[in-house]
Amino acid sequence: MSDTSRSIIKSMCYYASRKPVRMHMPGHKGRTAFSSGTNQVETTPEWAWNLLDELRAIDMTESPGLDNLHYPTGCIRETEKRAEKIFGSSRTHLLVNGATSGVQAALMAVRMTLGPGTVVLPRNVHRSMVTAMTMSGLEPVFVWPEYDHRLGGYLPLDVDRLRAALESASSSSEHSSGVDGPPRAVLVINPTYCGFARDLTKVAELVHSYGAALIVDEAHGTHFAAGNDLPPSALQAGADLVVHGAHKTTVAFTQTAFVHVGKSTPERFPALAAALEEALRAVQTTSPSYILMASLEQAIEMMEKEDGAWIDRGVATATELTKRLSRIPGLSVVGYEAGVPVPPGLMHDPGRVLINLNGLRCTGPQAAKYLAEVHKVDPEMTGPKSILLIWTGADDEKTIDVVEAAFRDLAQEFAPEPGSKNGSGPMASALQLMREGPRPKKVMSLREAFLSVAVPVPIEEAVGRVSADTIVIYPPGSPLVTPGEAIDAEIVEYIENAKKAGMNVLGRGIQGSNGNGNNGTMMVYCVAER
């Protein structure tokens, strides 16, 4: 192996050799799932190099005795059937291009089945939805869900807001020639990144009454179908197409996912399942990794094993962790104390441990830096004044002790000082972000703006321009601005505050927490003026 200073393998091994407490995806947490031990190996570059070399023995393609992901009839199809039994679907497909490809294919399939029109969806969708809508040609009708910064931002879309949006979209399509067409689909996020979910039965009934298909981005809820004391799966509620990011909460490898067709969907939309298969052929690689698909088979095995005991163990230990953290002064753990309860009508996944830091004199990014550098506890996400941990069946009682100790030290390190004020620097910027973000105005179709000739514009000069860019604060990756929306002064101020607070602001010309492109200037790509 050559001695390169910044190789991928060396970077991976450096991270693993730190032996961090991985409070983030993937769900296996870097631990073995079926063999004894917890990966007690020295993760040196030489070890990784040799491991990859040995993996070549099972790096295969559509060879004799194997199968074809796009037209499965053998081992892949048998694995899909096992998944169908667990999830209660009429058809399940393995994905090796992530949940993103599942959402893209789902929207394309709806367009192929029901024709052009609109898709009604909440504003807290993942940025991958933007490309999915561009590819499908369905124009978005965004709905703004209830917002509560203590609960991680936007909550799951409720029936009343959805009904109003559907009525408006349907009425507009009937009476105006300038709209984008009737609603062909509703796409909802369930659960949210921070683990909030609702029973979607009434949502499904409402959507179907409008003749539209219900697509559910359940990327963070793969485990719902196999565990106890968890929100119900969207497939149980009557959704038509459901996408799961398998690596997020199971033992599957990063980049793997599932997309499912609901049990009753073939009766409602007879052509949808076939359209989905064809759309998947368009968005997934024609050379899928058998190693990735094999890890999906292991995830299925783990969900089958002892009726989901691995998942239930994660729920139990996550609940214990939250009880301990809620006793630490300065911290407020969502859903597990009177101050920040789970709202009526919603449920919460215990494996999403959301900790508000309002009683401490630090921002979310500052807290994450301290936890990682001092205690090797690496969170999944930071908010302006919050930390999100992801907990799964791979975590154990020993991990509870380590994480609790880290947060006790954090609370002591950043305890409020008598007479101190949080009115300057990153803290002031973080406090400015503890509100709902701007609501941009749509002035051009998303697809037209996305495919337009675009020019980079310094952000302070972008006010009044039309965005060709998707600008997000990541994670979770929900769009602050989408193509076709006008950039105003409030948006610019919000982006600048996010950058100052240490948040990751991403776009074509915006990279990372400093928000700068290669030339050091914060840029945004706008539709070229004619």
Image: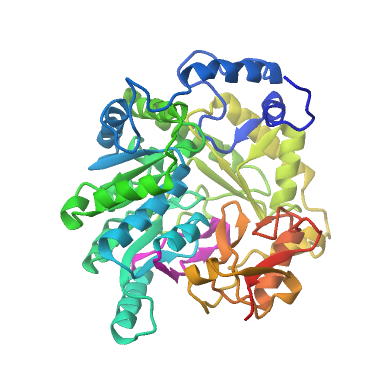
Is residue 219 in sight in this rendering?
no
Q: Residue at x 75, y 52 (%)?
A: 362
Q: Is residue 119 left or right of residue 51?
A: left
Q: Which residues are magenta?
A: 137-159
Q: Quadrant of residue 164?
A: bottom left
Q: Quadrant of the N terminus?
A: top right
Residue 288 on image: x %, y % = 44, 34
Find residue 520 and report its image quarter: bottom right
Q: Quadrant of residue 436?
A: bottom right
Which sits in the foreground, 317 or 208?
208
Magenta includes 310? no
Q: Say whether residue 323 is visible.
A: yes
Up-down: is 33 above or below 386? above
Q: Quadrant of the C terminus?
A: bottom right
Q: Is residue 320 above or below residue 428?
A: above
Choose between 73 and 467: the one closer to the eye.
73
Task: Name which residue lies at 57% across and 27% down.
Answer: 30
Pick the front one: 227 or 223: 223
Tell me residue 519's x, y (percent). Answer: 81, 59
Count up the numbered dots: 0
User: Where does residue 274 sit, x and y in percent of width and height?
Assistant: 25, 49
- Could you tell whether 21 is left or right of 287 in the image? right
